[in-house]
Amino acid sequence: MNDVSDPSGSKPNLWLRGLYMLLMALAFHVCVTVLGVVAVIQFVVTLLGGSPNVQLVRFGRGMGRYLGQITDFLTFASEVMPFPFSEWPTGE
């Protein structure tokens, strides 16, 4: 897993982390918008078809986990940088 510590293993480079935090905050806002669109689509699919779309359920779970990873990174709860610097979380 990628983290923002410098190669010598000492304290993390806070300026670099700050840049990554700005990028992750932007990704968070884009993902929230996408999740809202997916929720509306899922509602319509369920309304018309009687049951939720399994692929959208899986995608929503993965997106929720990704948003959690971003939140952990932004609040310094984790040094592991989320996707695209690590693998996309599974929705299973």
Image: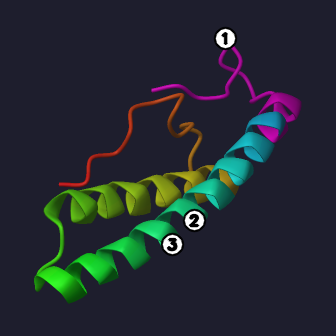
Task: Tell which of 28 and 10 is nearer to you.
Answer: 28
How many numbered marks are there?
Answer: 3
Q: Amino acid at mark 2?
A: Val
| Residue 13 colored in magenta in the image | yes
Q: Position of residue 18 (x, y in %)?
A: 83, 40
Q: Residue at x 82, y 29 (%)?
A: 16
User: Residue at position x 11%, y 86% from top?
Assistant: 50
Q: Is residue 81 visible?
A: yes
Looking at the picture, does residue 62 appear above or below residue 88? below
The residue type indicated by label 3 comes to Gly
Seen at 37% across and 72% down, the residue is 41
SS state under label 2: helix
Q: Which residues are magenta?
A: 1-18
Q: Which residue is mark 2?
A: 32
The answer to whether residue 91 is left or right of residue 4 is left
Magenta residues, dominant SS class? loop
**Residue 81: mark:** none
Residue drawn at point x = 11 percent, y = 80 percent: 51
Q: Which mark is residue 36?
A: 3
Residue 7's mark? Answer: 1
